[in-house]
Image (cartoon, rainbow, N blue to C red):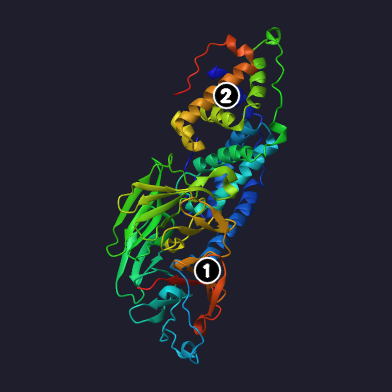
Amino acid sequence: MNRLLRETIEEMTADMYAPTDTLARKAMTEGGRIRRRRRLATAATAVAVIAAIAIPLLFLPRGGGGGLAAAGPQVITEEPTPLAGGWLVNSAGRWYLDRERQKYVQLPDSVLRAPAGDRVVRSTPDRAFELTTVTASQTLTVQGRQFRGDLQWAPTGDRLVGMISQKEPSRVGFGIIDAATGTVTEHWIDTTVYDCSECTFNWSRDGREVVLAIADRSGGEAAELVARLQLFDAATGRPTRSLPVKAMPSSPFAWSPDGRFVIADADVLSRRPQLVDVATGTAKPFPYNAVWATDDLLLVPQDGMVLTVHPDGTVVERSTLGGAFTGEKNITLGPPA
Amino acid sequence: MTREVKSVAESPEASFTAFVADRAHALLKTAYALTGNRHAAEDLVQNALAKAYARWRRIDGEPEPYVRRMIYNDFVSAWRRGRRHPEISVAEPPEWSGPARLESDTALRMLLRDALLTLPPRQRAVLILRYFEDLSLEQTAAVLSCRQGTVASQTSRALAKLRESVPQLDLWPDPIEVAR
């Protein structure tokens, strides 16, 4: 019967005609649309909140203002205005907060600033990563050919996590980069048990665990649905916890300080932020992709301002960014030192 | 079945076009074996290729396994969502013509072909992967993102249904191995 079955299938497939000449072009056109949708979703997430790690420097127009406009092109002397919980705007556009001097420094290119400390990372054309500080006091180059996609800073600003993959044998896992030494530690996961689609990794709020969204493939490839969250020990790579959260948080600060709730996207392609009870998985739509500044206040960067929001979604304060940051959309936020 | 067609020196568009030119027909055959319908096969392959192109730079090495995995998973997922193609759903098993009319393997293959298309998509996918792609239990489980035990049970059920639909198969020797 094996032979007969094999012959039957082969005979059947012989009926399939050759592809049309337009197949590649059509696929590229549609693929371009998919890519643009993904970029929009990613950019929107980053601007909207991701905040935690990245959001803006808030310069409230109190005290007469004018500090930013009068500043030179390299360093802005104005001190950042504290947000709820002592949070600060970590970067706005290419202005990055020098936490030691409490000033904003302009860098020549875009980098990913750590939410704490002064480290930044940039990728190089040869698929390496350059680790340095806002003031470029130290520079370290890390070869990162095994990494795919974006890196995510640990909430403590001392490590980065990113998805790694390899072929033959095909493996997927996460790599931890020690920002001080450049050492890369690889942890491979069993994808037959922990099946992921995008396979992006992020951090728990305490930086001890790494979070992976387990795929719910019921939506096909057109959606990036989540069945649950699996956490791994960041140091050993061992699985630690499984949470009934059917959404992926975009930063370690998407988790509330008490660990009871998380703001996460149910589908990163369509941007559906939810407030999820971590213990039960009960979710309700949340109007913003926000980060938790305190147990009962969240921050949302939005169109040149930062909103302070209650967990019920009510806006309690709007802080407008002024000076050089007026209207800046690429803003990241960071916790107090 | 798979070949390295991406080159670092090529643009993504050029390497993708080369890949499609080289492998699309084979992918279409697989999709046709799954769907039993040429238009559905074209849709399935075109969608998978579009998704692959969207991530083309991130596919390191051979893209074909990645595309094939999407084809299989999209096929099974579409069924789960209730979007099965009406033209490939057969409400009743095909009529059995009776032993007297089974003059050759060809006639039996025709019956078997019809019976294959009555199988639920996951079972059909399992058989295509194992008997057409010639994948092992482990490899099939990896493609469908399920456990090897699931593959084994789906294979067993699929073969049982085929025998039920085509009783003439009982005349054939039965070296059916579920676990290779």
The quadrant of the rendering that contains the N terminus of chain A is top right
Residue A6 visible here: no
The quadrant of the rendering that contains the C terminus of chain A is bottom left
- How many C-alpha atoms fall within 10 Å of the one at disc 1: few (<14), some, or many (≥20)? some
Looking at the image, residue A313 sits to the left or right of residue A335; the answer is: right
Q: Residue furthest bottom?
A: A64
- Residue shown at the point (50%, 40%) measured from the top left: B65
Q: CA distance from mark 1 to mark 2?
A: 54 Å
Q: Is residue B20 above or below residue A127?
A: above
- How many C-alpha atoms fall within 10 Å of the one at disc 2: few (<14), some, or many (≥20)? many
Identity, as a three-letter code, of the amino acid under mark 2: Ala
Q: Nearer the viewer, residue B108 or A66?
A: A66
As drawn, the label of residue B158 is: 2
Identity, as a three-letter code, of the amino acid under mark 1: His
As drawn, the label of residue A310 is: 1
Residue A143 percent coordinates (x, y): 34, 58
Residue A123 visible here: yes
Looking at the image, residue B121 sits to the left or right of residue A175; the answer is: right
Q: Quadrant of residue A11?
A: top right
Residue B57 percent coordinates (x, y): 49, 54
